[in-house]
Image: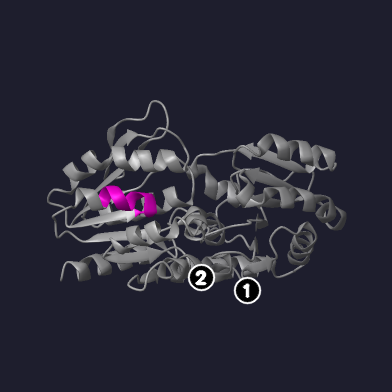
Amino acid sequence: MKIVVHCVYFPPEVGGLESHVHYLCRGLAARGHEVAVVTSLSRPGLARHEVVDGIGVHRTPLPARNALGWFAHAAGSTGRTRALVAGADIVHAQAFPSLLPCALALAGSSTPLVCTLHTSHFLRLAANRAVAPALGKLVEMSDHNFAASKEIADVGEGLGSSISVEVLVNGVDTGIFGPVEGSLPPRDGRRRLIVPRRLFPKNGVEYFVRAMPMIVEGADVDAVVIGDGPERGRLEALAAELGVAGRIDFLGARPHADMPRLICSGELAVFPSLVEATSVAALECMACGVPVAASAVGGLPEIVDETVGGLFPPGDPVTLAAKVLELLADSDLSVRGATGRAMVVGQWSNERLVDRHEEVYGALLGQ
């Protein structure tokens, strides 16, 4: 099949959506499909066209990293998308901003259009009564809709009576993400927490920082925060104010290829999110055999339970600290990690994700 995928962001950008699209497309290309991705010139120096892991990547300008910028990129990328979809078997919009350029590029064509609904941005817009009707019209353009979590699927179906959305949790490359030797040695014999979160308010890292004094009272631990963002300066200042600056190392952003060894440097991964779809990063930690403590929001309860870690209410440092200390006191903590690995391999591997996409594509083509 010739498959054209549209997505605002693609590696070297780092994030759950970017990882999902990259690994899905790489898996499809490895099975002999011709895959092209239309994405943005999100950083200076990126090539307008290159081949990455067998995927043809085509980049067009991105005026700004916000909603207006995304839609401006969508409009500006329509011409390039139209050129690529000529002769395509399937066109796949990865997130709602990609639906319009894909639909415009397919005008007058019978080529099937597939959409995957991702991220908290979709949830916020769907909750806006002024925007929701137009968003519903966009989603109705697709011949088949996926969603990264049940929450997103339910919201998507609520936008129109004719809209049907299939829940398909994001996948993980379990060949890359697995138990390996950690790249960060223990410091002063302390146990280590890993927080792989970009530093934006929605990811709730502030509440983890506020929980650290209580965690340190109950266990000799330090923490490594992997990710960057506009909150970094404020969070570092907060850690200093609370007296835990020496216990939290803000590493900043790291290449995705470094993540397995960074994750495996910790005994427990913490996800203090305030809003979440289905966290690819949490699945990657589970695939590495690291237990996960996470906020009970969005799609996280769909992948995290007491067998692989535990949940706590969002935005509450006290219950966050209590859950972390409870898990650190568990003599069978490593068993939870092994259970998480088995669950990802069995249910959420990238191979299974690619399998389902091939099934849906084939059904739409009448194969």
Please say whether residue 98 is one of the residues in the magenta stretch.
yes
**Under tag 1, what secondary structure?**
loop
Marking on residue 176:
none
The percent position of residue 219, horizontal first and vertical second, equals: 83, 56
Pointers 2 and 1 in contact (CB under 8 A)? yes
Front residue of this view, candidates 56 and 259? 56
Please report the residue visible at 33 percent of the width from the left and 60 percent of the height from the top: 137
The percent position of residue 166, horizontal first and vertical second, equals: 38, 70
**187 vs 48: above or below:** below
Please say whether residue 310 is one of the residues in the magenta stretch.
no
Q: Which three-letter amino acid code belongs to the residue tagged 2? A: Met
The span shown in magenta is 94-102
- Residue at which label 1 appears: 307
Can you see residue 128? yes
- Residue at which label 2 appears: 343
* Horizontal relation, residue 226 to residue 113: left or right: right
**105 vs 165: above or below:** above
